[in-house]
Image (cartoon, grey):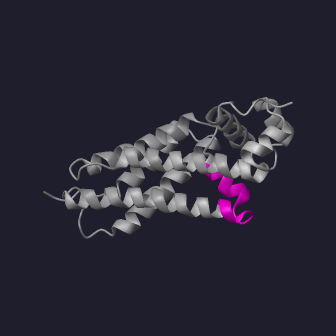
Amino acid sequence: MGRPASFDHAEMLETIQSLFWDKGYAATSLDDIMKSTGLGKGSLYAAYGAKEDMYLLAFTDYCDWAVENAKERLLGDDEGAFARLRKYVQTSAKGAATSRRGCMLAKGTAELRGRFPEVDKVIEKTFKALEGAILECVCQAQRAGEIEPNRDPKMLAATILAAARGMEALGVAGASSASLSLVAQGVLSLLTPARR
């Protein structure tokens, strides 16, 4: 018998998400999910659907959080946009150096891209939103005179996103804090402040 329908859905989703994040889709069994949540097969299926549906819910929840987190860190007034970009890159390097768990978005993309159309849609939407938040901040910094106006903002945004994702992968692989700091410095050197 599974738990009654009054169980905490948010708590259960967090538990399921943590399993998929740590083990990946293929290595996470239904038994693993039942054991971790304390829910029976019937309760799981009734609440979340099949394993693929559970993964999609957990993955989408993570990606939504990642986008909101990036927007909170990057968006604001035009003045100070350059400082927010600098902090975003530096924080990405520091986070990559201390977290060996890695990013669920990166893990899910590596494992499942091209296997499930709905997951592909979430991946595409998430990377587009992340790049969009960075692009807006770059444009704000240009409007504020903090980055040269003749620099291509889309190129800068794409480079910053690629660097942030790359630093995360390097961190999982064991790159040192000093090495990741050098990457951050290299990226920041591209954001040439406008001459005043």
Q: Quadrant of residue 171?
A: top right
Front-lying residue, 75 or 192: 75
Which span is picked out in magenta? 105-119
Drawn side of residue 110 relative to residue 66, left or right: right
In the picture, measured across the screen, residue 60 lies left or right of residue 193, that is: right
Q: Position of residue 11 (x, y in %)?
A: 64, 32
Q: In which quarter of the image is the N terminus?
A: top right
Residue ID at (50%, 44%): 180
Which residue lies at the image location 22% right of the left edge and 55% below the top edge?
146
Image spot of residue 56 (x, y percent): 68, 52
Q: How many marks?
A: 0
Q: Is residue 117 visible?
A: yes
Task: Residue at the far front: name it.
Answer: 5
Q: Can residue 147 be spotted in the picture?
A: no
**Which residue does the image show at 63% across and 46% down from the upper left?**
104
Q: Residue at x 38, y 44 (%)?
A: 73
Q: Is residue 148 left or right of residue 153?
A: left
- Residue 32 x %, y %: 82, 36
Judge by depth and name the residue closer to the eye, 149 or 130. Answer: 130
Q: In which quarter of the image is the C terminus?
A: bottom left
Residue 86 sits inside the magenta stretch: no
The vertical placement of 79 against 115, above or below, is above
From the viewer's perspective, tell me whether residue 9 is left or right of residue 81: right
Residue 130, image x and y in percent? 47, 56
Which image quadrant for residue 195? bottom left
Q: What kind of secondary structure does the magenta stretch mostly adopt?
A: helix
